[in-house]
Amino acid sequence: MITLRSAFTAAALATSSMVIAGTDAADSGKNKLEAAVAPANEKSIYDQIWGLSKLYHNKDTLIQDIDFTGRAQFDWAHIDSDAGDLDTWQARRLRAGLKVKFADKFLLHGEVDFAQQKFEDTSYRRMTDIYLSYTASDAFVFTVGKHSVKFTLDGGTSSKELITIDRSNLANNLWFTEEYAPGVSVGGKVKNWQYFLGWFTSDGNPEFGNFDAGTFMLASVGYDFAESLGCDRALLRLDYVHQQEDAGNAATRPFGNIASLNFNLQKGKFGLGTDVSAGEGYGSQGDVFGVQIMPTYNITKKWQAVLRYTHMNGDDNSIRFARYESHVLSGKGDQYDEFYAGVNYYLYGHKLKWQTGVQYATMQDKKNDGGEYDGWSVVSGIRISW
């Protein structure tokens, strides 16, 4: 049986070999690009390395699979703006854990998140996933424990599979950026329909939660129009969140109600993502409305171009800055516009890729209390996942 140490060694080998070895990522016609399939009698270096994450497999025993899981993401960011400049290297995400499948229908998943920001600071930060799920069928999956809360276009996409270097500022403002919350949920797919219904605590405890704050409910329903439109994918989804107002809500944004109507289309090499979202704030948080448009084009099986435009309006200077912009300016504003152009290079699908994005953003500040912004940024990074 392969140890976790071997799996971490594999990650290092992947990073060092990515510039000298390559296997084309297959153009699947969907947002998710998968690795090209090598001949049956020949595995690529990537197949061999990522194969080490399979620690155990035996379909005839009580425990069928034990897999190493995790992600390592590293960024370089540069900002040139009227509010100040930034040049930094960061360990964007560092996570590791295990998935154990047993009794055919059960999955136990635990994953640890390590402190980010600086390469030398990699101490334990929190548990992300720690849940047990039961899959009765594609139409019914029951999950209990701390797991991902997915809504909005970018918030509904794992950081492993983002096609921009980071999520849009719409998701940064309206989605719950801690992402993982203790709770219970049911979800599944029935033909072209998909649904999710969950109830979670908002307290933000780094482990399983103290349940001493408010709670929120997430309901999501979607329909894939791919067949009727002649596309590979055409998923229209409506997400709705209702949250109790509570001073202890540390893991969520202060919104009582959030709604997102998002659409994800893929036809051949062309893709389009859209999102129209709004949040009703409570306390000092004003209402926020946002629109996101994101066309993509798969230039080759490895290269992908991405454009994104984000517009947001907020009452009472209630819009936050995006991740790296907030390192330059800590204030808020009432109107935000962002233009993003990026390129992705897939060495092994989403499991090993290089992403770069150039962004121009402005923020208006009617209150004139330190939130006005006009600047350019470049963010480039490596994304590795298992």
Image (cartoon, rainbow, N blue to C red):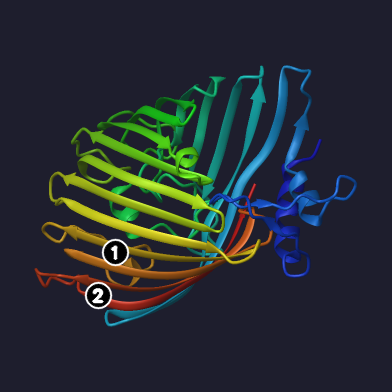
Q: Is residue 271 left or right of residue 331?
A: right
Q: Which residue is mark 2?
A: 373
Q: Could you tell whether 196 is left or right of 158 in the image?
A: left
For the residue pair 230 and 322, the one nearer the viewer reads as 230
The amino acid at mark 1 is Phe
- Mark 1 vs 2, N-terminal side: 1
Q: Which mark is residue 65?
A: none
**Kind of element beneath mark 2:** strand
> Measuring 10% from the left and 69% from the top, which residue is drawn there?
366
Picture quadrant where residue 382 is located: bottom right
Amino acid type, mark 2: Tyr
Of residue 386 and residue 24, the one placed in the foreground of this image is 24
Instruction: Determine crowd level at label 2: few under 14, some 14-19, many 20+ residues with C-alpha closer than 10 A.
Output: many
Task: Please say if 343 is above or below 162.
Answer: below
What percent of the width, then of the height, locates residue 66? 70, 32
The numbered dot on residue 321 is 1
- x and y percent of residue 353 in the render? 62, 61
Badge 1: few (under 14), some or many (20 or more) residues near its Cα, within 10 Å?
many
**Can residue 234 be seen in the rendering of this structure?**
yes
CB of mark 1 within 8 Å of CB of mark 2? yes
Q: Residue at x 45, y 49 (%)?
A: 265
The residue closer to the viewer here, 59 or 275, is: 275
Could you tell whether 334 is left or right of 151 in the image?
A: left
Where residue 203 appears, x then y in whole percent?
31, 36
Whether residue 330 is visible here, answered yes or no, is no
Position of residue 2 measured from the top left corner of the image (x, y, whole percent) = 79, 40
